[in-house]
Amino acid sequence: MARKTVDIVVGALRAGEGFTTAQAVHSRAIALGHSVSVATVYRTLRLLADAGTVDQMVGDDAQLRYRFCGDAHHHHLVCRSCGLTLEVEAAVIENWTNEMAQARGFVDVRHILEISGVCSTCSA
Ligand SMILES: [Zn+2]
Ligand SMILES: [Zn+2]
Ligand SMILES: [Zn+2]
């Protein structure tokens, strides 16, 4: 996968907010002046999703949507069967880890938490 293609796709993803379909990512890349095919965008998004660089979610229309992962701290709920990765908010965990570690005199506290299971599509 060419570095340039990755930069184009990631750039197009970051140019918008929230989760976006591959089609919309492609339109955005074109609008930004890049010449890249829809097939290349699809393939690159899938590779980036496998690498954990982008998050995926399934929309109400059953289409996969993508978002650049890594700007803000968040956690993932991952399907062990199909690899679907959802972002989850976990204020309880943020507060607990900080308070628990600070109470024991720790500073610069960080944590990694990934939750896995089988998604509703795969378990149906
Ligand atoms: Zn993420
Ligand atoms: Zn699944
Ligand atoms: Zn956290």
Image (cartoon, rainbow, N blue to C red):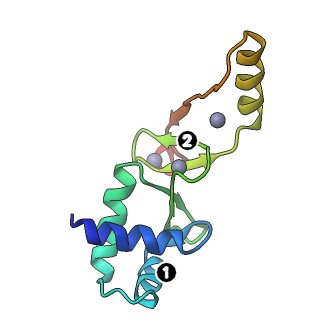
How far apart are labels 2 and 1 at the CA level? 24 Å
Callout 2, which amino acid?
A: Leu
Residue 5 falls in which quadrant of the image? bottom left
Alpha-carbon neighbours of circle 1 within 10 Å: few (<14), some, or many (≥20)?
some
- Give SS at disc 1: helix
In the rendered image of this protein, does residue 97 appear above or below residue 88?
above
- Would residue 98 appear left or right of 69 to someone viewing this image? right
The label on residue 24 is 1
Q: Nearer the viewer, residue 91 or 86?
A: 91
- Residue 14, label in figure: none
Q: Determine whether, in the image, residue 47 is placed left or right of residue 15.
A: left
Q: Front-most of 110 and 54?
A: 110
Q: Amino acid at mark 1?
A: Ala
Q: Is residue 53 above or below residue 14?
A: above
Q: Look at 71% across and 30% down and name the residue there.
A: 93
- Residue 24 percent coordinates (x, y): 49, 80
Q: Is residue 53 left or right of residue 87?
A: left
The mark tally for this picture is: 2
The image position of residue 90, as x and y in percent, is 71, 38
**Front residue of this view, candidates 66 and 1:** 1
Pointer 2: what residue? 77
Name the secondary structure under disc 2. strand
Residue drawn at (30%, 83%) of the image: 36
Q: Position of residue 10 (x, y in %)?
A: 42, 67
Outermost residue on the top side: it is 104
Left or right: residue 101 compared with residue 22:
right
Q: Residue at x 56, y 49 (%)?
A: 86
Q: Position of residue 65 (x, y in %)?
A: 51, 66
* Quadrant the N terminus occupies: bottom left
Check contact, mark 2 vs mark 1: CB within 8 A: no
Viewer-proximal residue among 82 and 11: 11
